[in-house]
Image (tube, helix red, strand yellow):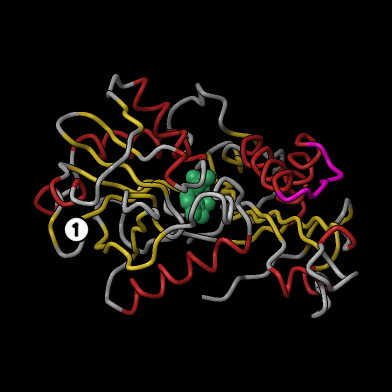
Amino acid sequence: MAVKKSEKIWHNGKFIKWDDATLHVMAHVVHYGSAVFEGVRCYSQPKGPAIFRAQEHMQRLINSAKIYRMEVPYSREELVAATVELVRVNGVSPCYIRPIVLRGYGQLGVNPLESPIEVYIANYEWGRYLGHGSDEGVDVCVSSWNRLAPNTMPAMSKAGANYMNSQLIKMEALLNGYVEGIALDVNGYVSEGSGENLFVVYQGSLYTPPLGNSVLPGITRDVVMQLAKEMSIPLVEQLIPREMLYIADEAFFSGTAAEITPIRSVDKIAVAGGVTGPITKAIQREFFNIVNGAVPDRFHWLTPVPVASAQTVSV
Ligand SMILES: Cc1ncc(COP(=O)(O)O)c(C=O)c1O
């Protein structure tokens, strides 16, 4: 599905027209994948649009850039303010927000330090990612592709180039009739989906791989952890052997795009008889209550966008 364009894009501190946000084909990023980015959601709440975990996303963007020695000339607060203003100016909610920091048009050698840093923030209308209704699970496989090896491509940086690996995982899954693939790390332990973190419920506890298993430090992963703590569900960050996926009582993905998506089967082995389990349901329900504004934002996860006129779109 093509992106539905909005009116404006924020570029280096100014609003430009969507169609003017173009790059030269000889920009460093085009050849070497030299970009870091974020994916953020803005929900439509009864009181207006609200951006989910804006500060945490912008902090991760700055962290991702720092790993690659990219100096972002804006503070976290400036980036959050620019995002709020962008959503207000474009007047589209709910929406997906895509901030990106890239190495632009300058030198074309591998050395990136001579190329200018460009910062863009775009937003556009967007709905559910993994395709199913929120109560149904998705059918997934274990990928034949491993996740990034430690000390090769740093998994804690949300870098554009990492998504070449994600693309291999996703294409293989789709071509084999699955909705998503779960990648193992180089040592054969469960890592994550092409664009989601993974949780498994086993004997009443919630398990997720630690950051050392080449996972992105997901912001929704953190949401799940905080909700589990509040619900007194034991949470264990530990190595997860592949076979635990097959005997799990429940399993689900977490991510900005996937939100909380139950997993119905792995490699055609049903998880919990193919129905969404009680822990997944409880976390999913609370997640949607918060993002939809049905309960107070007790964790301060939402940044309201002060607009009276944002048009609400149905997705
Ligand atoms: C590889 C990968 N893992 C995990 C996630 C989930 O992270 P978050 O919850 O911050 O969206 C994403 C999505 O950004 C991702 O691309």
Q: Residue at x 62, y 70 (%)?
A: 4
Q: Residue at x 56, y 48 (%)?
A: 41
Quarter of the image for residue 35 reads bottom right
Q: Which residue is mark 1?
A: 265
Visible residue check, residue 256: no
* Dominant secondary structure, magenta: loop
Indicate if the residue with disc 1 has its beta carbon within 8 Å of ligand 1. no
Q: Position of residue 39 (x, y in %)?
A: 59, 52
Quarter of the image for residue 237 reads top left
Q: Is residue 206 left or right of residue 116?
A: left
Q: Position of residue 157 (x, y in %)?
A: 61, 48
Disc 1 crowd rating (10 Å Cα; few below 14, some 14-19, many 20+) is: many
Q: Residue at x 73, y 40 (%)?
A: 80
Q: Secondary structure at mark 1?
A: strand
Q: Please say whether residue 96 is one of the residues in the magenta stretch.
A: no
Q: Position of residue 27 (x, y in %)?
A: 82, 73
Q: Is residue 237 left or right of residue 221?
A: left
Observer-nearest of 133 and 262: 262
In the rendered structure, which amino acid carries the disc numbered 1? Ser
Visible residue check, residue 13: yes
What segment is highlighted magenta in the picture? 68-75
